[in-house]
Image (cartoon, rainbow, N blue to C red):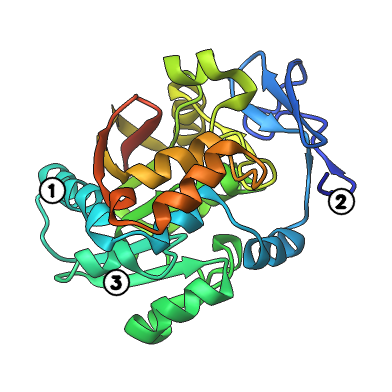
């Protein structure tokens, strides 16, 4: 069991509601659902500093992605790049990737002035080797505010990790130009796959994932900060065969699925591309007025 700090949400961190119902208990973490905005969240959490240290030493689903062939990452990233052009009509400008990891999405956006924030010092150093001082190690709450500077801000598999999602979205709003685009990609806790899987849904990984969103809480948090013109999409991805078994194992090294994952990792068979769209990933696009 993972030890946590004494931090505890008494009110819903999204809508400040006080009525919850317990969903799950996973590895000592209580996971509740707000009756008002319907966000699902971990009640007892670590501090930002503890989480940062934890990310450096532990493995999660996102860390597996960085070791996969970049081709599979780029499949999704290129779709996202086309959506950015379709919505904004822009092929260049200032773009900030929050939770940029090693800068893999920024690599795709060659025509843009690229900036990134990454909590993991290890991953941030990879991004800094390519983009220098445009990459900051840390969290967006500590990022030097550049008001009305960015044309696009992306948060891919990030908001579900944040201790204060509302503050993160507020910061993004300040830094976007009027008419600027925010893109948020998270797991969709309301999808059929998640509802059938219950607490074994692969994305339920406290303390990595602290929040579990669906359309309603995403719309609430964006509206609260001043964003408008929402568009929700379930964009298909390509993952490797070995990753299917890693997700089924949920990182449990004693699981038979994890053993299959390790076996497949030794052979080219594990790299077979698998198209995936179970509506388990939701991407929302919204603009600053």
Q: Secondary structure at mark 1?
A: helix
Q: Position of residue 9 (x, y in %)?
A: 79, 35
Q: Position of residue 182 (x, y in %)?
A: 34, 47
- Mark linked to residue 114: 3
Relative side of 148 to 249, left or right: left
- Mark linked to residue 255: none
Residue assigned mark 2 = 5
Q: Is residue 191 visible?
A: no
Q: Considering the image in quadrants, where does the C terminus appear?
A: top left
Do the residues under discs 1 and 2 have CB atoms within 8 angstroms? no
Q: Secondary structure at mark 2?
A: loop
Relative side of 173 to 21, left or right: left
Dividing the picture into quadrants, the one containing residue 256 is: top right
How far apart marks 3 and 1 lie (CA) works out to 17 Å
Q: Nearer the viewer, residue 94 or 155?
A: 155
How far apart marks 1 and 2 lie (CA) works out to 42 Å
The local crowd at label 3, few if under 14, some if 14 to 19, many if 20 or more residues have their Cα within 10 Å, is many
Residue assigned mark 1 = 82
State which tag comes first along the sequence, 1 or 2.
2
Relative side of 44 to 148, left or right: right
């Amino acid at each position: 069991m993972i030890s946590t700090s004494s931090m505890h949400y008494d009110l819903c961190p999204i809508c400040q509601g006080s009525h919850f119902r317990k969903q799950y208990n996973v590895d000592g973490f209580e996971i509740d659902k707000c009756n008002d905005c319907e966000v699902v969240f971990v009640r007892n959490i670590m501090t930002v500093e503890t989480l940062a240290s934890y990310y450096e030493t532990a493995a999660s689903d996102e860390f597996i992605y960085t070791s996969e062939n970049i081709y599979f990452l780029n499949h999704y990233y290129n779709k996202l790049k086309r959506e950015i052009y379709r919505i904004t009509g822009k092929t260049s400008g200032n773009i900030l990737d929050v939770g940029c990891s090693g800068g893999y999405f920024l690599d795709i956006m060659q025509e843009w002035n690229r900036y990134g924030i990454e909590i993991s010092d290890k991953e941030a150093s990879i991004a800094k080797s390519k983009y220098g001082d445009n990459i900051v190690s840390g969290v967006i709450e500590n990022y030097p505010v550049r008001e009305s500077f960015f044309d696009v801000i992306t948060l891919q598999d990030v908001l579900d990790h944040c201790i204060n999602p509302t503050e993160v979205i507020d910061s993004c709003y300040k830094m976007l130009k009027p008419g600027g685009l925010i893109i948020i990609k998270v797991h969709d806790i309301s999808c059929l796959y998640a509802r059938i899987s219950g607490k074994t849904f692969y994305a339920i990984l406290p303390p990595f994932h602290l929040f579990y969103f669906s359309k309603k809480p995403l719309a609430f948090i964006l509206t609260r900060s001043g964003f408008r013109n929402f568009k929700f999409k379930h964009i298909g991805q390509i993952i490797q065969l070995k990753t299917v078994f890693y997700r089924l194992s949920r990182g449990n090294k004693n699981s038979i699925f994890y053993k299959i994952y390790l076996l497949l990792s030794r052979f080219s068979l594990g790299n077979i591309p698998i198209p995936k769209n179970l509506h388990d990933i939701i991407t929302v696009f919204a603009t600053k007025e």
